[in-house]
Image (cartoon, rainbow, N blue to C red):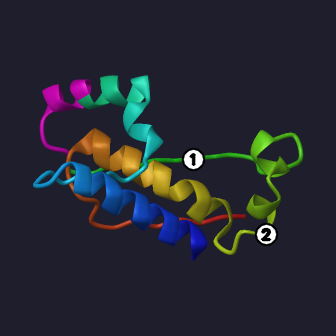
Amino acid sequence: INELETALSTYKSISADAPGQIIWSVAENYRFEPALIEGKKLIADIGKMMSVQVIVEGSMNSSNPYFSSSWRRSFTGGFILDMGVHFIAGLRMLVGCEVVSVSAMTS
């Protein structure tokens, strides 16, 4: 809660310095990935997407640098919620529309 209060306080002070301008952004790093930026351009040339399938395989074990973060090992949603938001953001960026449905499985 303390972090949220700090973020809101900072946002309000920045907004006060720029009246009439909306300053807000979702902190999503995938929108700056060069491969996704280029992919978006290429997909735009193809036309409207009818279906997209994304397969993500990853190992979350001690050799993975992310595993060293203690919160990631005990995160309630696991790897799918931790990284899934980024994969979906990248997918939305690539296809240029809202995702209608998503399914996932893990083992």
Residue 93 position within the rendered picture, expressed as x and y whole percent measured from the top left: 30, 43
Mark 2: few/some/many CA within 10 Å (<14, 14-19, 20+): few
Quarter-wise, where is residue 22 in the image? Answer: bottom left
Tell which tag, 2 or 1, sits nearer the viewer.
Answer: 2
The numbered mark at residue 74 is 2
Visible residue check, residue 24: no
| Image coords of residue 38 (percent x, y) | 32, 22
Q: Which residues are magenta?
A: 41-49
- Tell which of 23 and 103 is nearer to you: 23
Quadrant of the frame with the C terminus: bottom right
* Depth check, front residue: 28 or 91: 28
Give the secondary structure at mark 1: loop
Percent of width and height locating residue 84? 52, 57
Q: Position of residue 26 (x, y in %)?
A: 37, 53
| 14 drawn magenta | no
Identified by mark 1, the residue type is Val
Give the crowd class for mark 1: few <14, some 14-19, many >=20 residues within 10 Å.
few
Residue 61 visible in image: yes
What's the residue at 57%, 66% (across, down)? Answer: 3
Q: How many marks?
A: 2
* SS at badge 2: helix
Q: Are marks 2 and 1 in contact (CB under 8 Å)?
A: no
Amino acid type indicated by mark 2:
Ser
Name the residue tied to disc 1: 56
For the point 42% across and 65% down, the residue is: 9
Name the quadrant containing residue 44.
top left
Asked which quadrant contains residue 98, the reply is bottom left
Q: Residue at x 24, y 57 (%)?
A: 16
Alpha carbon separation for disc pair 2 and 1: 21 Å
Q: Is residue 100 above or below residue 59?
A: below
Query: What residue is at 45 percent from the left and 47 percent from the top?
Result: 54
Quadrant in which the N terminus is drawn = bottom right
